[in-house]
Image (tube, helix red, strand yellow):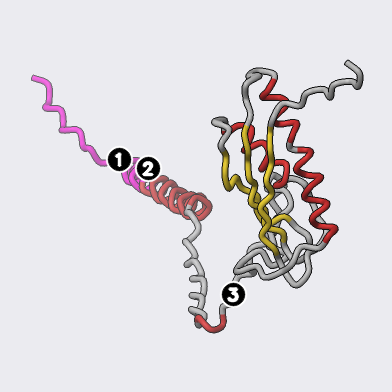
Amino acid sequence: MSPPTPPSSSLPPSGVPDSSGNTKYAVIAVLLVVAAGGIFAWRTFGSHNEPPAPTAALAAPKPENPKIDDVPAPPPPEEKPDAAAGPRIVYVQAGNCEGKCTGVPSPELVGALTVRGNQARRCYNQALASDSSLRGHVTVAVRVGSAGNVCSASVASNDMGSSSVANCAANIFRTSGGLPSPRGGCVDANVPLSFVPQTAAPQGGQ
């Protein structure tokens, strides 16, 4: 029989260092180096990526409410003339047309009223062309102011049966313009008008 083989020992031979212990220390050293590098990198890059801390916005000072007396009044609106309105016309009644008239007609005024009566005959002549039987009498009431202005002219009486001739005659006096001034104030005059067809005078010896 062969002699029994002695059991192999796990211990390294004398003079040879234990490799398993060195490996452990190397792994631990590598881990420490990696961890240190990671912490340094985190601190370096993390400081750049952090957003800046928000700054508190400065609150604007609240305006003080001014007193009502300190506020200036707004300027008045500018008045612009209305071009479409035209000039402003103010009517002034002249010549003492109101009240009772106590004046006296002057000779010049009587003559001027007679002329207006003759001018009113054209109203009759125009109507006579349509109605040859038209004839009659019209009285026009005329009020003349102290300055010779015609205050009013209206039909006082009319027996012609046609109002158109009478109204036309009154309008002749109403629009006649200025007349000679009466004496002592305004006067009321009634101007009689006789409208009959005019015939040619017969020639002598016939």
Residue to which mark 2 is pinned? 16
Inter-mark Cα distance, 2 to 1: 6 Å
Residue at the extreme right: 205
Q: Which residues are magenta?
A: 1-27
Q: Which amino acid lies under the numbered mark 2 shown in the image of this protein?
A: Val
Q: Which amino acid lies under the numbered mark 1 shown in the image of this protein?
A: Pro
Question: Could you say whether the residue bearing mark 2 is in a helix, strand or loop?
Answer: loop
Residue 11 in picture, x, y percent from top left:
25, 41
Q: Residues within 10 Å of mark 3 (few under 14, many from 20)?
A: few
| Sequence-wise first label, 2 or 3 | 2
Residues at badges 2 and 3 in contact (C-beta under 8 Å)? no
Q: Is 171 covered by the magenta stretch?
A: no
Residue 29 in picture, x, y percent from top left:
41, 49
- Residue 164 marker: none
Residue to which mark 3 is pinned? 73
Write down the quadrant of residue 182 in the picture. Answer: bottom right
26 over 106 or under it: above or below: above
- Residue 12 marker: 1
Inter-mark Cα distance, 2 to 3: 110 Å
Q: Which amino acid lies under the numbered mark 3 shown in the image of this protein?
A: Ala
Q: Which is in the foreground here, disc 2 or disc 3?
A: 3
Q: Is 11 covered by the magenta stretch?
A: yes
